[in-house]
Image (cartoon, rainbow, N blue to C red):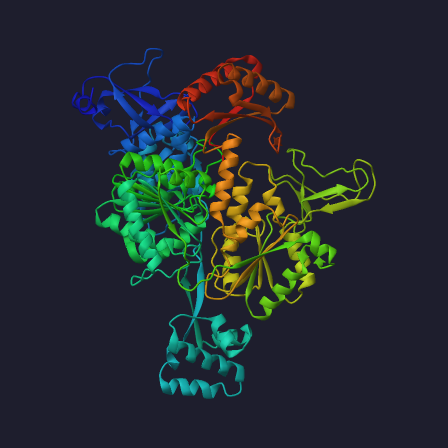
């Protein structure tokens, strides 16, 4: 029966199937009190009791007149919304994700909705402390809640139920939240701070000719300050925004001189928000003119979209892909449809927003997990009401309630951060976006300088349209890449700890020319592990099967998996000998050695440790961009599209650790990472070079990076993938079993593998422990299913797998064993 017919009959008994924000296998059916019949719609939130005393807000999935057969339906307590907050197409997306990624609808609801839209009895609320809000218009009950929050720093929703003596408090809390009186405490996170740059302006007192002459006369005895003012005057003739650095360089003065002028209020400092990220290095202006290559690419995109719904734009770094994206979004808006622009990093999201606002103004919304819940709920409602027609966001923005989506852009589509690792749903935002686009009949553009093997294969197989953009925008030159054999350099006695003489001399030259340098080492900390030279003992984590990394900053050994720390040892606990040796080197050690080798160089470090503080990431990058540092040492954070005008030298200190990682995507990822790191150099007109240090200079991946030969890398990888049964030719599903007892985990994994082999035979690989076989005192065993794309139904395999896991969990021998499923675990 259609929902409309059900609504008309206010006197019949309605039953609703609801999605609860819990990892349970089925939806649950509740009964609707007749006085609430008229308010029930698919997609609204209702308040229900589940379990003994837990209260949740659940989403109505369907409405019916039949009572459930196996249990008595409880009554719902209340209806929260007058209009649906989840639309039918979103519910279809949730159903597809639950089926494809083999997870529960409740887990998808948890991932999809901002915390304010899924309040439960355990949710905590805090007062917003906004002095401008007027409490005088509030009801007595609302007053009671706010009075309680004045005394206690935060309250659980269950506490509010006790204070008011009623279970139905969600509509009241929703009203207080909408009016800005309360916030949801689990979502109060530090907002990502946009990057600002300091620009100088002259105090208006000295702007006319007479004032300027008086100023110069007053600085007669301060020659350097006079030089700085004259330099500023010269720069003012040719440009609008003048930075401290530009004045210092032209006048040849130190930072102290400028500080004195600022203190005297001769110069005024203005902070402006600027962008720093790759792909976005072309100034976005209304009058922007396309290069011939961009114009051709745009025409090819239009032609490609006429033939196919999914298109891959393969454009080299700094080729100006963003400008093409903007033109396509403009066209989509002109046709009355909305657009979603997905980016892999929160940082990128924040940085590009300022520029896109030039084009789309108030039609533009931004959505990612660093926004507090007030802002996320606001974006949700503005997308629902079509106030926001363009959304820029990280992977979670695919869940927003779009109604007329015409275009999805997935930039840097190769990025691993599009894949959600934990908790479920372990979805890939790119693949989910392709399904979402198909539901709307909209177009989807995947952009990358180094596309994933799967996407490029689909484009080559003509499943997707393909457009290539092979020229950098403007006069930017592709950097030259030099490979150095560390064995050979050592033989020539031209190694200085971790640096070849060639790299050191190049760094000295760059610093002399006032150019900047980026060094890449994909290990953080000081020393990756400590080992006894006598007996071979290695310092390991007590909770995880992984060596501890020594961090000089804290003078402690750290586990990068569970966070365990302990003081370092000087005597081996196994054999009692004092011969503890440091093995390997991380970013801290590189920084320490460089300070000895280049004592005058100004060095900064960019890794998880150095960016932990509030805005740490931002401070380091802003300082480097303003040339307060000569050298930036970083982990793969620096490959994520940073764009600095003065970087002309990139050093990759140890290429082998990436190439030799035990993973079927190691060569593809190494090629991508090295190409992306190399893409940080020469993003302006200056000549630039990349130096790669390695013990295997003839390795094919390195040769392909040097020759910018993506096609060669792809052709060899695709043969290997076919021969060894990997994607895109085979589908992978990984089953992880976890238990605090190693033996229990192993035995349970053997039982499950045996059960699966009854139907899937040779397609079941394992069980085997992963590379890190114990994390947080849980032993892990992995079983991998490799399913042929031809001749077997993947959905039938998933059906069998789901039934097998239920049988496995019913067996008492497997009590306490956690089973985690990851479809497409890469």
Q: Nearer the viewer, residue 153 or 695?
A: 695
Residue 798 quadrant: top left
Instruction: Establish if 240 lies above or below 384.
Output: below
Residue name at image x 64 percent, y 52 percent: 588
In the image: residue 231, left or right of residue 302:
right
Q: Which of 403 and 485 is in front in this view?
A: 485
Q: How many discs appear?
A: 0
In the image: residue 329, left or right of residue 612:
left
Where's residue 559, x and y in %? 63, 40
Q: Can residue 153 be seen in this view?
A: no
Instruction: Establish if 37 lies above or below 649.
Output: above
Residue name at image x 48 percent, y 42 percent: 714
Instruction: Establish if 482 lies above or below 763.
Output: below
Residue 267 quadrant: bottom left
Q: Which of 771 and 78 is in front in this view?
A: 771
Q: Can residue 110 be seen in this view?
A: yes
Quarter of the picture holding the N terminus: top left
Instruction: Establish if 668 lies above or below 624.
Output: above
Where's residue 268, x and y in %? 43, 72
Where's residue 514, x and y in %? 55, 69
Q: Which of 686 and 373 is in front in this view?
A: 686
In the displayed orientation, state which residue is furthest to the top. Answer: 69
Where's residue 338, x and y in %? 27, 45
Residue 772 quadrant: top right
């Amino acid at each position: 029966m259609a929902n409309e017919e059900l609504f008309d009959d206010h006197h019949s008994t309605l039953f609703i199937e609801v999605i609860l924000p819990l990892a349970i296998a089925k939806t649950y059916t509740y009964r609707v009190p007749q006085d609430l019949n008229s308010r029930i719609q698919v997609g609204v939130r209702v308040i229900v009791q589940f379990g003994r005393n837990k209260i949740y807000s659940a989403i109505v999935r369907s409405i019916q007149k039949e009572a459930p057969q196996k249990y008595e339906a409880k009554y719902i307590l209340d209806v929260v919304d007058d209009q649906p907050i989840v639309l039918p197409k979103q519910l279809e997306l949730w159903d597809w994700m639950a089926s494809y990624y083999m997870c529960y609808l409740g887990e998808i609801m948890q991932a999809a909705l901002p915390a304010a839209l899924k309040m439960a009895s355990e949710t905590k609320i805090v007062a917003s402390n906004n002095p401008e809000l007027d409490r005088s218009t509030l009801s007595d009950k609302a007053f009671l809640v706010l009075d309680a929050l004045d005394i206690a720093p935060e309250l659980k929703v269950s506490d509010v139920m006790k204070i008011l003596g009623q279970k139905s408090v969600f509509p009241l809390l929703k009203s207080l939240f909408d009016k800005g009186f309360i916030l949801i405490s689990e979502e109060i996170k530090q907002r990502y701070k946009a990057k600002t740059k300091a620009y100088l302006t002259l105090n208006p007192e000295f702007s006319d000719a007479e004032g300027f002459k008086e100023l110069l006369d007053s600085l007669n005895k301060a020659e350097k300050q006079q030089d700085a003012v004259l330099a500023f005057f010269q720069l003012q003739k040719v440009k609008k925004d003048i930075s401290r650095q530009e004045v210092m360089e032209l006048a040849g003065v130190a930072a102290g001189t400028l500080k004195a002028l600022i203190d005297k209020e001769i110069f005024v400092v203005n902070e402006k928000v600027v962008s720093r990220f790759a792909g976005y290095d072309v100034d976005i202006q209304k009058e922007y003119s396309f290069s011939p290559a961009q114009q051709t690419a745009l025409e090819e995109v239009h032609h490609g979209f006429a033939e196919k719904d999914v298109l891959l734009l393969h454009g080299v770094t700094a080729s100006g892909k963003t400008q093409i994206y903007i033109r396509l979004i403009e066209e989509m808006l002109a046709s009355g449809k909305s657009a979603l622009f997905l980016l892999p990093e929160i940082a990128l999201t924040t940085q590009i927003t300022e520029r896109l606002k030039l084009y789309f103004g108030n039609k533009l919304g931004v959505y990612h997990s660093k926004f507090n819940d007030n802002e996320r709920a606001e974006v949700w409602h503005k997308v629902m009401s079509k106030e926001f027609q363009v959304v820029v966001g990280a992977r979670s923005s695919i869940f927003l309630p779009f109604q007329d989506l015409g275009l999805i852009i997935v930039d840097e589509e190769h990025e691993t951060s599009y894949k959600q690792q934990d908790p479920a749903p372990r979805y890939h935002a790119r693949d989910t976006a392709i399904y979402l686009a198909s539901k709307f009949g909209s177009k989807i553009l995947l952009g990358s300088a180094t596309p994933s093997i799967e996407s490029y294969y689909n484009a080559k197989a003509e499943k997707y349209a393909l457009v290539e953009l092979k020229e950098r925008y403007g006069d930017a030159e592709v950097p030259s890449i030099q490979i150095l054999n560390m064995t050979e350099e050592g033989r020539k006695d031209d190694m200085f700890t971790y640096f070849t003489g060639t790299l050191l001399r190049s760094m000295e030259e760059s610093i002399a020319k006032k150019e900047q340098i980026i060094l890449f080492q994909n290990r953080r900390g000081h020393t990756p592990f400590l080992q006894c030279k006598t007996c071979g003992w290695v310092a390991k984590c007590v909770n995880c099967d992984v060596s501890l990394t020594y961090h000089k900053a804290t003078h402690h050994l750290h586990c990068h998996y569970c966070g365990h720390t302990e003081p370092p040892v000087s005597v081996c606990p196994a054999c009692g000998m004092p011969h503890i040796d440091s093995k390997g080197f991380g970013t801290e050690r590189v920084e320490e050695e460089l300070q000895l080798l280049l004592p005058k160089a100004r060095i900064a470090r960019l890794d998880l440790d150095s960016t932990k503080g509030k805005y740490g990431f931002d401070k380091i990058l802003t300082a480097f961009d303003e040339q307060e540092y000569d050298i930036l040492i970083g982990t793969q954070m620096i490959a994520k599209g940073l764009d600095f005008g003065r970087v002309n030298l990139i050093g990759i200190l140890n290429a082998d650790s990436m190439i030799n990682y035990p993973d079927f995507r190691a060569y593809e990822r190494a090629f991508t990472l090295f190409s992306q790191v190399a893409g940080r150099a020469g993003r302006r007109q200056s000549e630039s070079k990349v130096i790669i240090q390695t013990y295997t200079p003839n390795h094919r991946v390195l040769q392909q990076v040097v020759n910018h030969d993506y096609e060669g890398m792809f052709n060899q990888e695709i043969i290997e993938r076919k021969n060894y049964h990997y994607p895109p030719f085979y589908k992978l599903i990984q089953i992880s079993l976890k238990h605090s007892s190693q033996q229990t985990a192993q035995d349970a994994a053997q039982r499950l593998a045996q059960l699966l082999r009854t139907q899937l035979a040779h397609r079941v690989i394992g069980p085997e422990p992963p590379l890190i076989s114990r994390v947080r005192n849980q032993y892990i065993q992995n079983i991998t299913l490799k399913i042929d794309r031809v001749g077997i139904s993947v959905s039938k395999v998933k059906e069998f797998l789901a039934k097998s896991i239920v049988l496995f969990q019913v067996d008492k021998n497997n009590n306490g064993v956690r089973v985690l499923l990851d479809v497409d675990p890469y």
